[in-house]
Image (spheres, grey):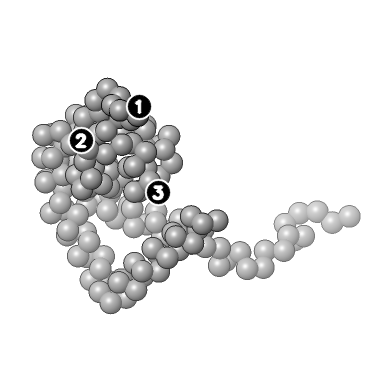
Amino acid sequence: MKSGFADLDLTGTRGCAAFNLKRAARAVTQAYDEALAAAGLRSTQFAVLVATARTQPVSIGELASLTLSDPTTMTRNVRLMARAGLIDVPARGPKREKRVRLTAKGTRALAKALPHWRAAQARFVGAFGGPAWKGMQHDLERAARLAARG
Protein backbone atom coordinates (compact mmCIF):
# COMPACT_ATOMS: atom_id res chain seq x y z
CA MET A 1 0.00 0.00 0.00
CA LYS A 2 1.40 3.39 -1.01
CA SER A 3 1.41 6.32 1.33
CA GLY A 4 2.70 9.85 1.27
CA PHE A 5 2.35 12.95 -0.83
CA ALA A 6 2.79 11.13 -4.14
CA ASP A 7 -0.68 9.64 -3.62
CA LEU A 8 -2.40 13.03 -3.52
CA ASP A 9 -4.16 14.31 -6.61
CA LEU A 10 -3.51 18.07 -6.46
CA THR A 11 -4.86 18.77 -9.92
CA GLY A 12 -6.32 22.28 -10.10
CA THR A 13 -5.21 23.42 -6.65
CA ARG A 14 -2.94 26.18 -8.04
CA GLY A 15 -6.10 27.94 -9.19
CA CYS A 16 -7.76 27.84 -5.76
CA ALA A 17 -9.80 31.05 -5.47
CA ALA A 18 -9.56 31.13 -1.66
CA PHE A 19 -5.77 30.73 -1.62
CA ASN A 20 -5.11 33.25 -4.39
CA LEU A 21 -7.51 35.89 -3.06
CA LYS A 22 -6.19 35.49 0.50
CA ARG A 23 -2.60 35.77 -0.74
CA ALA A 24 -3.38 38.94 -2.69
CA ALA A 25 -5.35 40.37 0.24
CA ARG A 26 -2.42 39.81 2.60
CA ALA A 27 0.03 41.53 0.25
CA VAL A 28 -2.27 44.51 -0.31
CA THR A 29 -3.07 44.74 3.41
CA GLN A 30 0.66 44.80 4.25
CA ALA A 31 1.23 47.66 1.80
CA TYR A 32 -1.63 49.69 3.28
CA ASP A 33 -0.56 48.84 6.85
CA GLU A 34 2.89 50.24 6.06
CA ALA A 35 1.39 53.44 4.65
CA LEU A 36 -1.05 53.91 7.55
CA ALA A 37 1.60 53.22 10.22
CA ALA A 38 2.67 56.87 9.91
CA ALA A 39 -0.79 57.79 11.21
CA GLY A 40 -0.70 55.15 13.96
CA LEU A 41 -3.38 52.93 12.39
CA ARG A 42 -3.63 49.56 10.73
CA SER A 43 -5.74 49.00 7.64
CA THR A 44 -8.35 47.08 9.62
CA GLN A 45 -8.77 50.02 12.02
CA PHE A 46 -8.89 52.44 9.10
CA ALA A 47 -11.67 50.38 7.48
CA VAL A 48 -13.71 50.38 10.70
CA LEU A 49 -13.21 54.13 11.15
CA VAL A 50 -14.30 54.83 7.56
CA ALA A 51 -17.33 52.54 7.81
CA THR A 52 -18.30 54.14 11.12
CA ALA A 53 -17.82 57.68 9.81
CA ARG A 54 -19.98 56.94 6.76
CA THR A 55 -22.88 55.32 8.65
CA GLN A 56 -22.80 56.47 12.28
CA PRO A 57 -24.41 55.79 14.54
CA VAL A 58 -24.00 52.19 13.44
CA SER A 59 -24.46 48.88 15.20
CA ILE A 60 -21.59 46.44 15.52
CA GLY A 61 -23.61 43.96 13.46
CA GLU A 62 -24.02 46.49 10.66
CA LEU A 63 -20.27 47.23 10.73
CA ALA A 64 -19.57 43.51 10.46
CA SER A 65 -21.95 43.25 7.53
CA LEU A 66 -20.50 46.30 5.77
CA THR A 67 -16.97 44.95 6.01
CA LEU A 68 -17.94 41.27 5.53
CA SER A 69 -16.36 40.56 8.91
CA ASP A 70 -17.33 37.96 11.44
CA PRO A 71 -19.51 39.67 14.12
CA THR A 72 -17.36 38.24 16.91
CA THR A 73 -14.20 39.62 15.29
CA MET A 74 -15.88 43.00 14.77
CA THR A 75 -16.97 43.07 18.42
CA ARG A 76 -13.37 42.45 19.50
CA ASN A 77 -12.02 45.10 17.10
CA VAL A 78 -14.60 47.65 18.24
CA ARG A 79 -13.79 46.92 21.89
CA LEU A 80 -10.07 47.47 21.25
CA MET A 81 -10.72 50.67 19.31
CA ALA A 82 -13.00 51.93 22.07
CA ARG A 83 -10.22 51.30 24.62
CA ALA A 84 -7.90 53.32 22.39
CA GLY A 85 -10.48 56.14 22.45
CA LEU A 86 -11.15 56.03 18.71
CA ILE A 87 -14.83 55.13 18.89
CA ASP A 88 -17.55 55.42 21.48
CA VAL A 89 -19.64 52.40 22.36
CA PRO A 90 -22.53 53.54 24.54
CA ALA A 91 -24.73 51.26 26.61
CA ARG A 92 -27.17 49.16 24.64
CA GLY A 93 -29.93 51.13 22.96
CA PRO A 94 -33.29 50.03 21.63
CA LYS A 95 -33.35 46.45 20.39
CA ARG A 96 -30.30 45.78 22.61
CA GLU A 97 -27.96 47.22 19.94
CA LYS A 98 -24.78 49.07 20.68
CA ARG A 99 -24.58 51.92 18.13
CA VAL A 100 -21.03 53.17 17.81
CA ARG A 101 -19.75 56.60 16.79
CA LEU A 102 -16.36 58.13 16.17
CA THR A 103 -14.91 60.07 19.05
CA ALA A 104 -13.06 63.35 18.53
CA LYS A 105 -9.82 61.32 18.77
CA GLY A 106 -11.14 58.86 16.18
CA THR A 107 -12.05 61.72 13.85
CA ARG A 108 -8.56 63.21 14.23
CA ALA A 109 -6.95 59.79 13.64
CA LEU A 110 -9.02 59.30 10.49
CA ALA A 111 -8.15 62.80 9.25
CA LYS A 112 -4.45 62.09 9.87
CA ALA A 113 -4.66 58.72 8.11
CA LEU A 114 -6.56 59.83 5.00
CA PRO A 115 -3.58 61.44 3.20
CA HIS A 116 -1.50 58.29 3.83
CA TRP A 117 -4.34 56.12 2.56
CA ARG A 118 -4.78 58.34 -0.51
CA ALA A 119 -1.06 58.06 -1.29
CA ALA A 120 -1.14 54.25 -0.92
CA GLN A 121 -4.30 54.07 -3.04
CA ALA A 122 -2.76 56.25 -5.77
CA ARG A 123 0.41 54.10 -5.79
CA PHE A 124 -1.55 50.87 -6.00
CA VAL A 125 -4.05 52.02 -8.62
CA GLY A 126 -1.27 53.70 -10.61
CA ALA A 127 0.84 50.55 -10.63
CA PHE A 128 -2.16 48.34 -11.38
CA GLY A 129 -3.59 50.70 -13.98
CA GLY A 130 -6.76 52.71 -13.45
CA PRO A 131 -8.98 50.89 -15.96
CA ALA A 132 -7.59 47.51 -14.91
CA TRP A 133 -8.27 48.38 -11.27
CA LYS A 134 -11.88 49.38 -12.03
CA GLY A 135 -12.37 46.02 -13.74
CA MET A 136 -10.72 44.18 -10.85
CA GLN A 137 -12.83 46.08 -8.32
CA HIS A 138 -15.96 45.02 -10.21
CA ASP A 139 -14.73 41.42 -10.34
CA LEU A 140 -13.92 41.41 -6.61
CA GLU A 141 -17.36 42.76 -5.74
CA ARG A 142 -18.90 40.07 -7.91
CA ALA A 143 -16.74 37.38 -6.27
CA ALA A 144 -17.83 38.58 -2.82
CA ARG A 145 -21.50 38.46 -3.81
CA LEU A 146 -21.15 34.98 -5.35
CA ALA A 147 -19.27 33.62 -2.34
CA ALA A 148 -21.78 35.14 0.10
CA ARG A 149 -24.60 33.28 -1.66
CA GLY A 150 -22.79 30.00 -1.03
Give percent across and percent down for residue 30: 33, 52
* Residue 116 visible (yes or no): yes
For label 1, the crowd category at 10 Å Cα-Cα, with few meaning under 14, some 14 to 19 and many 20 or more, is: few
Pointer 3 residue: 68
- Disc ID at residue 96: 1
In percent of the image, x 51 and y 57: which residue is there?
149
Nearest the eye: 7 or 18: 18
Tag 2 secondary structure? strand
Left or right: 145, with 126 as reference point: right
Q: Is residue 66 above or below residue 129?
A: above
Q: Element at badge 3?
A: loop
The N terminus, quarter of image: bottom right
Rendered image: mark on residue 101 = 2
Q: CA distance from mark 3 to mark 2?
A: 19 Å
The location of residue 100, given as percent across then percent down, is 25, 34
- Judge from the rendering whether residue 16 lies leftward or rightward of residue 117; answer left or right: right
Task: Say which amino acid is labelled 3.
Answer: Leu
Q: Tell me where residue 135 appears, x and y as whole percent.
A: 34, 73
Q: Position of residue 13 (x, y in %)?
A: 61, 64
Q: Quadrant of residue 82?
A: top left
* Among the two numbered marks 1 and 2 on one chain, the one whose residue lies closer to the N terminus: 1
Q: Is residue 90 above or below residue 74?
A: above
